[in-house]
Image (cartoon, rainbow, N blue to C red):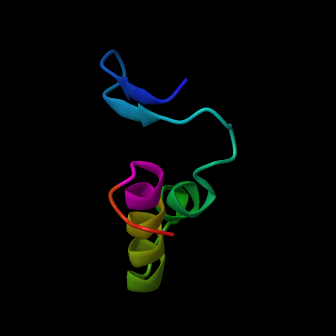
Amino acid sequence: MNGWNAETHSVVFASAGAMSAFNAWASAAAPTLAQASTARAEVWKKAGLLAD
C-alpha cells in the first residue's frame, strides 16, 4: 500500500526495498551531501513529484 502512515508519521511504499537510497542516508553515521541529494530525489520520484 502506498501513502501516508499517520501512526508512524512516515511515507509508505508497496515494495519493501523501494527506499534503498533513503534508508542508506537515514542510517548513515555521517551522511554526505550526495547521499542526502540522492535520497531526496528517490523520495520525490516515489511520491510522483519528480519525473524519472
Identify the residue at image location x=39%, y=48%. Answer: 47
- The answer to whether residue 46 shows anywhere in this view is yes
Q: Is residue 4 above or below residue 51?
A: above
Q: Quadrant of residue 3?
A: top left
Location of residue 22 in the rendering, given as x and y in whole percent from the top left corner: 50, 58
Quadrant location, the N terminus: top right
Q: Residue 38 at what x, y percent from top left?
A: 47, 74
Residue farthest along the front direction in this orientation: 51
Left/right placement of residue 42 relative to residue 33 reads right
Residue 9 spot, x, y in % from top left: 31, 28
Specify the principal SS of the magenta part. helix
Q: Is residue 31 visible?
A: no
Residue depicted at x 42% and y 56%:
43
Please report the residue visible at 43 percent of the width from the left and 81 percent of the height from the top. 32
Q: Which residues are magenta?
A: 43-48
Q: Is residue 21 magenta?
A: no
In magenta segment, residue 46: yes
In the rendered image, residue 7, in percent from the top left (x then y), is placed at 34, 15
Please state if 32 lies on the left or on the right of 7 as rendered: right
Q: Of residues 21 and 2, which is closer to you in this image?
A: 2
Q: How many marks?
A: 0
Up the image or down, 48 lies above or below 40; here it is above
